[in-house]
Amino acid sequence: MTRSPRAETRCAIGWGLLFALAGCAHRAPLDEPSEPPEGPTELAKHSQGKGQMEIIPARPLHRPKPMQTVVLPDATKPIVSFRLVFKSGSIDDPKRKEGLAALTATIMGEGGTKELSSSQLLQALFPIAGEISVQTDKELTVFAGRVHKDNLDRFLKIFTDVLLEPRLDPKEFERLRTDAVNRIRNQLRGQDDETLGKVGLDALLYHEHPYRHFDGGTVEGLSAISLEDVRAHARRVFTQDRLAIGLAGPVDAQLEKRVKDRLSALPSTGAEPVHLPPVPAVKGRTLILEKDVISTAISIGCAYGLRRGDPDYYAVAFALSFLGEHRQFQGVLFRELRERRGLNYGDYAYPEHFIQEGGTTLTATNISRSQQDFSLWLRPVEPANAVFTTRGALYFLDQLIKNGIPRDTFDVVRGFLTGYTRQWDQTDQRRLGYAIDELFYGTPNFLEAFRLAMARMTPEDVRQAVRRHLSPARLNFVFVAKDVTELASALASEAPSPISYPSPKPPDVLQVDKEIASFPLPIEAGSIEVIDSQAFMQK
Amino acid sequence: MLRMIALLLLTVAALAGAAVAQKAQQPFFPYPMRVEKLKNGMTVVRVPFRSPGLVAYYTVVRVGSRNEVEPLHTGFAHFFEHVMFKGTKRFPEGTRDKLLASLGFNDNAYTEDDFTLYHSFGPSSGLQQLVEVEADRFRNLSYSEETFQTEAKAVLGEYHKSAANPELKIEEELARTAFERHTYRHTTLGFYEDIKRMPQYYSYSLEFFHRWYAPDNAMLFVVGDFDDAKLMQWVRENYGPWKGTSARMRIPSEPRQQGEREAKIEWPTPTLPRLIHAWHTPGSTLEDLNSAIQSVLGAYLVGPTSPLYKELVLDKHLAESIGTRFYDHRDPHLFALQATLSDEQSRERVEVAFEAAVQQLLDADVDAKRVADIKSNLRYARPMSLETAEQVAEQLAVHAGVYGAPNALELHYRDLVKVQPGDLVAFARRHLVPRNRTTLALTAKELPQAQEGKPKT
């Protein structure tokens, strides 16, 4: 059964460094969040020309108090939700052991406890429909749990044992490590071009930064990890001083106390936090991942100095919703590239790193990051149209920067975001997720603040913020493609890339197409790198 | 020639007749539900739900790839779902999207084998306009041939974005091998060559709309925070004038399978090998327990607490994962066991293990405690899957789309409780037999060791 919805730095350095290890993590005392840069960002000051290096200053996330709790009680609900969020993620992976953070969390979540083997854990959870899931991102790891209130006591013991008494069985370690390697070798490289493109973009944007490698690790990094590494890593990062606790549903002060009492058996502290370095960003870099595919996947983006809580964040989020809200139909990119030109299945724009929560169109919660990126995602296109579609996306971004948002459309975007943000926290897990993200970003009542900002936003606010933070000239490009020589040559040549359609198009489309076909590609010809997709994420 | 017969009024067991409202506590569905059938045959279901200021609005039309009986037109129901967003005279292309966006609605649709589902979720304050816009497109869809042709290219793009994943190929080959005559022989996306041909079928699309988009073939589900009297007033005003009856079309019956079949796929890039054992099984109706039995059977044979999972995944790691492949269908479809193998060498041992587990059932060796655990799991998992207004609306609409009754979700829950260990044995003896089985094997291209990790210069 197919579900078929209408609508899923420095100067140019040698590509070899993309394979080098992310060796930029420095150890430092507890980070204090720094203030957002005033006025134009570093990037904006240096946005002219290609191939230049720009430095985005590091700005650590806020640190909640040790075992700070967020409680959202509702006695009328039958389901109790737990959300334990640790300030630890793939940035904590040691050199040459990329994937350790994610593998450790997975083994704890699935590999059983001292009392229960992995099989017994499943046997215990299944009849009560108890859920335990883990999520590892760059800076945060989540252990989420859900259970019916009838089975709370049994579940609470198991859920906390996962953290306090993980079994760390050698066989389970080998099994789950093999699965993690297969995820890279087979799923990402072999059968998911869109995610492959996005991971490729991470590697480009953060090529000398701990964000560089895929959260799930690298083939060689995972292969080098021992069970003792996992044991030691768990002790270092799953500590009280890194933990925020979320509880929702039929919960009370007594349950909160029980949870905190149990989790106070975690080490009070562990490893020093990783101090993230500034991001050296290079403009115009391009990566082509070669693969035998019938269509070309495209991801475009740049790291930038903007994130939740910054004064310009809401205005840029507003502008990029106008340009291409994820999986919605009213965005300019969707309307122009897909609806009017039929180039692909969808085209979207993102003001912060986006990971879709399964089964929804919404961004996952608790992927808070010190360093954010702006990106455009163009779903696969026919190879012959790859350069034209890329230029099309840049053209409409450029139009946004030059002309802002028309007044009538401005009110559409305002109305949409005012309503859409109310849908972002419909489940208890998402409510907890947002509340805990607020601790890391220092943005209390984020969704309400978002709506308030929408109500007050003016076209001029958006126009100015967009000019400060967005520019086609800053972007990097990733393509997953088959005919790499032809594509690389077309990208490097600066020659126009006209398009022909199988059906008639209105005159205004054809007129704009002429401009798109010769829109300057901010690609540094000498920085176009081609890699066999089977070699990507190897180390 | 196609045999077209005007469809008799949809028979809905739960309804006493047109314009009859019901209101009752549902023991297996935890929210109150009101059902009304309009005079034109359209069913409207409302569920008040605590989602302050928000409402979910789901319209299910009982047309899917099952209805694609004409050669060379596979995938058309899905394509037509896209066309439904192309506007009317009152709301020309783009204005609908703009209006719903300005109101704050998240709006989309998807197509399955048996139904097409149109869904919106957003502020209750925009409900009146949503009703107007939705009713208008179902009554007055209007689009140009150029628009139609452009959208056909977007659908091709949808196929392209799915083609990198072996799942689409597996689905295609399994259907093509297991079915000879029934329209379940093709997937919802349709055959690639047919998708490429779609721009030629503008006039056929007009016929398709007339044939299937009729009030007696649609059910509306509204869940959330709304005033029921006002809603029904808007619904009657806007959907009331919708006229027509849907076509009745004979879907070719699938002849009884008379011997084992095999499908093989050689995947051109590295991926883990796959194994599927699939058997033809009865369609989903509210008249028997076959669907409920298959839901329990999947968990029993390959669920996380099954001996097969312990042996194949946890203890021996012959498979990365195992699972079932069963979705409710109007007509007889497939029940399947599937494994993502750790490597090609595991294939034979996993096949033998699958066969042994099925043989145990055939021998009436069934673990009653595990059946009880599965039913306990389903009971506790139910409220977890009905946490939001959207989730409630979707589950109601999907079950109604397959079964044809607005309260099918509740009745399905009821049936799950009735399944007994002996039902699994009887079902296995009837259906999980070799002559009724299709085996699918996907083998992957081996990656030369030297190639991995070597950058291209």
Image (cartoon, grey):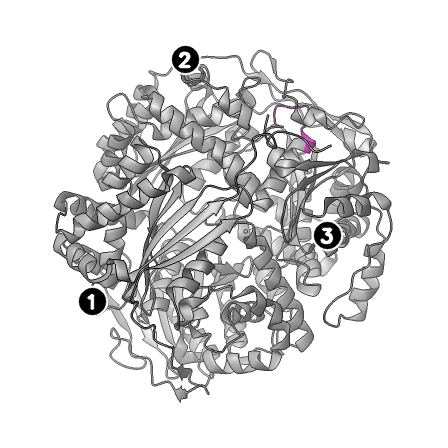
Note whether A13 is above or below A493 in the view shown.
above
Front residue of A161/B345: it is B345
Note whether B197 is above or below A224 in the view shown.
below
| Disc 3: host chain | A
Q: Amino acid at mark 3?
A: Ala
Front residue of A404/B357: it is B357
The reply to whether callout 1 and callout 3 are in contact (CB within 8 Å) is: no
In the image, are marks 3 and 2 on the same chain? yes
The stretch in magenta equals A204-211
Residue A358 visible here: no
Q: Residues within 10 Å of mark 2 (few under 14, many from 20)?
A: some
CA gap, disc 1 and disc 3: 52 Å
**First along the sequence among labels 3 and 2:** 2
Q: Residue at x 61, y 78 (%)?
A: B202
Q: Residues within 10 Å of mark 1 (few under 14, many from 20)?
A: few
CA gap, disc 3 and disc 2: 52 Å
